[in-house]
Image (tube, rainbow, N blue to C red):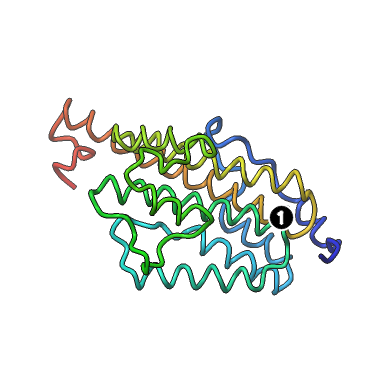
Amino acid sequence: MKPPAPSYTMLLASLPHLPDFERTKRLPIGPERLAQRLRLLDPEDQARLHAVCELLAWRIHAHDASSAMQRWRAAIESWLATEGDADVRERVCAALSRRSLLAALRRRHAGLPAPGPHEHWGHGEWMSKVARSWNEAHFGLAFRLPWLVTARDLLERGAAIELDRLCARLDWDDAGRLRQRRPAGYAAVLAYRLRWKILHDRLRQNDTAARARLQTLVQAACPAHPLAGACS
């Protein structure tokens, strides 16, 4: 593990504090300025950061084709083969495993069968357990993964917003653990970038939801108003 470069110390010092994503309505640093700051990373670390963001951006759907899933798993294996930081590997793999478990809940909720013995689906140590315990409410993992109980309940109730918030909280806390363990260097920058993406996405979702609510209210009160979509 290489020591943090002076430029990384300067980079981290230049990044504003990120408030908790549930307690702020403002993004402290915009995408363009953040991208500019991240250019202080050396090319190798820029590629590492991009690879992690791409892996975590993947959203596994209940109906994902085997070929798409294989591509995602291949990308994970390629990343694992090149990422030498054990702390980074641990935290990112935890997030990838969590996405796979959530996808398994959605797959079962959609009435689809468990992944077959030759179907390479999902990532993480729990996937074989999931396949064996498909008909158990929480795949027999409730004791080890209490958040799975809450996630299943929210999914069954159709509480999509609350489920998204739960997922964001788990990812946020994971990034915080990485930053606490590794307060300097590439790992700290990665933790910041992961939290920034959560905050950015949540604020964008909140803004979209607010506009939708406004349009609904306006339409109910004044159907001819431009915001109601009646005229341009």
Quadrant of the rendering where the N terminus is positioned: bottom right
Q: Is residue 61 left or right of residue 3?
A: left
Residue found at the far front of this picture: 132
Task: Choose between 9 and 82: the one closer to the eye.
Answer: 82
Asked if 94 appears above or below 216 in the picture, the reply is: below
Q: Position of residue 88 (x, y in %)?
A: 68, 57
Residue at x 29% of width, y 32% of height: 157
| Image-based side of 84 in relation to 225, left or right | right
Farthest residue, direction top: 221
Q: Could you tell me how many numbered marks the image carries?
A: 1
Question: Residue 111: x and y, percent?
Answer: 23, 49
> In the rendered image, which residue does mark 1 sit on?
87
Lateral position of residue 122 relative to residue 96, left or right: left
SS class of the residue under badge 1? Answer: helix
- The residue at the point 36 percent across, 67 percent down is 119
Quarter of the figure with residue 155: top left
